[in-house]
Image (cartoon, helix red, strand yellow):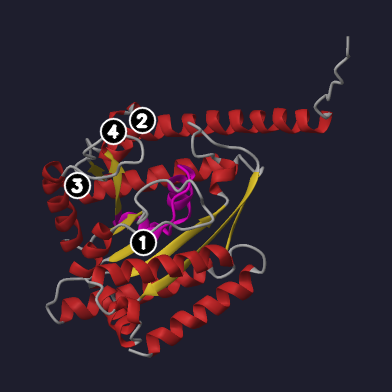
Amino acid sequence: QTERSSNPIPTSVLMGAMLGSLARSVYAVGLLGNMLWTTALMNVVHLAPMSKAWKEGVCLVLTQLAWRIALLFAPWMSIQGDDDYAEQWGLVLSLMAEYDSEDVREGKPRRPLFVLANHTSFFDTVLGVAKLPVQVLWRCRTYMAGHLFSFPILSTIGKSVGHFPVYFASDEDGVFKVDAKKMEPVEKRVDNHLQGGGWLSFFPEGQVNKSPEKIMPFRFGGMRKALEFDARIVQLVFRGNEQVWPRKCQVGGFPGKVRYSMRPIAPDGARAFVQIARAEGAKEEVDMPDHAILAKRAQELMQEQYEALAGDKQCALSKLHGKLQKDRKKD
């Protein structure tokens, strides 16, 4: 008989796995506890004598507070924003306030802000809400898959903050065609929200990316909406979220490193962005409709922003920022 040589798992690996599971459990308990008191307060808020918009805004701030507290007690997740993250948001908010005043003065409808983000994990939502400035969060709403409105806690949050359900025509994995008939009243709600001075945040890839290193093509629906309302666009990009909250895990909290940044890509509006792109005369874009050009260019910029978060982050982001400013001056 031949004896098989055993290859025991190194103790360091076992300890690492055990500590990772422990960290995840602690985060899960903290996150669940915070979400429970948050949803309880939301039910109270909706009984208060306030406007619908105020109730939704307060519930959004409560959600942000709950998720910030959960992150505060999970220091094993190293989360770091770009050095000028707050400064970039300050500039965008200043511009939006200036544009809002100008539109009101001229009797024009206020143009919304669209916040686009890459999607690799449910943690994208948690971190995005936790890190958005309150002034942005208050006016932002997003799309949620319709089936999430059947989950006990998520449904309370989604309904309380005024998010919009997305109804898919098929439950088959990887099939993301929407049910056009069911989406008609939803899109009317979205339009009313934007016409009333609201903003929109969503994942333009339309699904969780199984290969985070390569940003997927943007779906055209959101690009058409951006052009219809001539939205000003910023991109919020995360790197490493799938490490702390893997795609197929119901809850995250594993140790890991996460980086994020925000960059305005169309501060003068989606239409001006496309106009600048067309002026460059790229042959492959000559026969493309405006929404396809916007989707293609925005995806490329998001890819550059994602790659900039690895390695020499500051140098790469500065280069990207300079490119965006140069493109804007061409207008």
Q: In the rendered image, which residue does mark 3 sit on?
A: 52
Q: Residues within 10 Å of mark 2 (few under 14, many from 20)?
A: some
Mark 3 or mark 1, which is nearer the start of the sequence? Answer: 3
Q: Amino acid at mark 1?
A: Val
Residue 89 seen in render: no
Viewport quadrant of the N terminus: top right
Q: Amino acid at mark 4?
A: Asp
Name the residue tied to disc 1: 115
Q: Which residues lie in the magenta part?
A: 115-140
Q: Residue at x 84, y 21 (%)?
A: 6
Query: On the picture, is 46 further left or further right than 130?
Result: left
- Is the C-beta separation of discs 2 and 1 under 8 Å? no
Classify mark 3: helix, strand or loop: helix
Mark 4 lies on residue: 171
Mark 2, residue position: 153
The picture quadrant where one finds residue 102 is: bottom left
